[in-house]
Image (cartoon, helix red, strand yellow):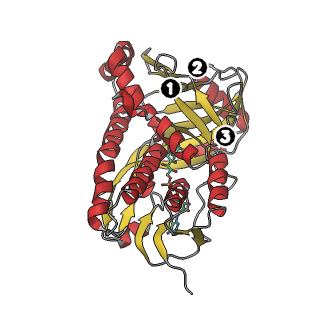
Amino acid sequence: MANTYDICIRGAGIVGRALALLLARERLRVALVAPAGVAPVSASGHGDVRAYALNAASRALLESLRCWPDERSATPVLRMEVQGDDGGSVRFDAFEQGSAALTWIVDVPALERQLADAVRFQPLIDVLEAPVDAALTVVCEGKASRTRSEFGVEFNARPYPQHAVATRLETEKPHGQTAWQWFTPSDILAFLPLDGPAGNSVAVVWSVPHERVPDLLAAPAQDFCLMLEAASHHTLGRLSLIGERASWPLQLARADRWVGRGWALAGDAAHTVHPLSGQGLNLGLADVGALAQVLQDREDWRSPGDLKLLRRYERARKSDVLATGLATDGLQQLFALPGAPAQALRNWGMSGFDRLGPVKDWVTRRAMGTRSGL
Ligand SMILES: Cc1cc2nc3c(=O)[nH]c(=O)nc-3n(C[C@H](O)[C@H](O)[C@H](O)COP(=O)(O)OP(=O)(O)OC[C@H]3O[C@@H](n4cnc5c(N)ncnc54)[C@H](O)[C@@H]3O)c2cc1C
């Protein structure tokens, strides 16, 4: 007898796999479509060099699926230091927020392995090469999704004049569970602590103008590290390269519709933001958490593909995604403005913000995914 499925999920990235596990837990039968030949997430071909900053809400969701990596692969961040281009700075401290960590820096291959293993052992999920009929199809194919346009969705994308170059470094000084970010008009450089509390390695995300990317990828390792030492003001001492270098084009994008009769979008297939805020996957995991909740709470007589039901999901998520996209975009544009007055204003704004206790706390809690602070 042919298999019948309640849900067909197209795309087996982190968002698609997390959704499959959430729905199988609700006793729904899931087809997870991962065709051979579709490009893997990694651009380098050697496993993804990235590490993601994941917030408390993402951690809770992944823990509920028993997919949260161990502490070496999910380093808790106790402090964040953000530096402007003319003395402005903002500091965040987990202790001041009364929290165990501001965020966790999660090794991407470790998280992908946890999710893949959990999917393999879940009997209600079948991993298939081709899509199948189901009451609901959820498109989790990432930003370059093809199925999205088959559903007639407009994906409004504005490319940034930057690419992100990512890699990993060993550092002379231990990171001390601190994450750093340095803003200049052309670049945004982030060092994210790896390998647990006592580690001395960092994941790097360096957002730079397109034209510098080929040289940065091709530079001899030693020259590349010297450039990073200068750009990070020698904060962690001597640096050595311990990972591949890979690059990603960056864009702000949003689908005009997220749902229709029998289908929904989630994750990067619905929206992408600049990685400077480390929020893209946090938004995608919040999408699948909300969709699973809406499906769980549905009236008995409603099918999972019922349009009214799916609109509940769209309403629940759109404002959060819009707010995060606008805030991230505003910060990127503020630092891209040329000229001394703009420079003075943004650095004055950063230091002023640093002294604004309640506002800073509010913003911090929002980014941390601890809504109780709102
Ligand atoms: C440099 C950089 C740093 C980042 N840092 C952070 C961070 O610190 N924190 C954070 O929260 N986010 C971060 N992000 C964002 C994060 O990478 C994305 O939001 C996240 O990967 C989206 O996951 P996804 O599963 O929706 O899409 P993807 O990861 O793109 O996965 C989509 C999957 O679908 C598959 N697929 C594609 N087409 C088809 C098809 N036709 N049929 C079936 N399958 C298909 C793909 O092969 C892939 O496996 C960062 C992004 C970049 C570029």
The residue that disc 3 covers is 219
Q: Looking at the rendered structure, which numbered label has been put on residue 374?
A: none
Vertical position of residue 182 compared to residue 148: above or below = above
Q: Is residue 297 above or below residue 99?
A: below
Residue 158 in view here: no
Give the label, 1 or 3, closer to the camera.
1
> Where 229 sits versus 220, above or below?
above
Tag 2 and tag 1, C-beta contact below 8 Å: yes
Residue 233: which disc?
2
Where is residue 314, by image quadrant? bottom left
Quarter of image, res 119: bottom right
Residue 122 visible at all: yes
Mark 2 belongs to which amino acid?
A: His
| Dot placed on the residue nearer the N-terminal end, 1 or 3 | 1
Helix, strand or loop at label 2? It is: loop
Foreground tag (2 vs 3): 2
Q: At 44% from the left edge and 19% from the top edge, which residue is drawn?
A: 90
**C-alpha separation, residue under disc 1 versus residue under disc 3:** 21 Å
Q: Which residue is mark 1?
A: 182
Image: 276 above or below 39: above
Q: Residue at 59% across / 70% down in the picture?
A: 126
Q: Amino acid at mark 3?
A: Ala
Q: Residues within 10 Å of mark 1 (few under 14, many from 20)?
A: some
Residue in the foreground of this view, choosing between 353 and 113: 113
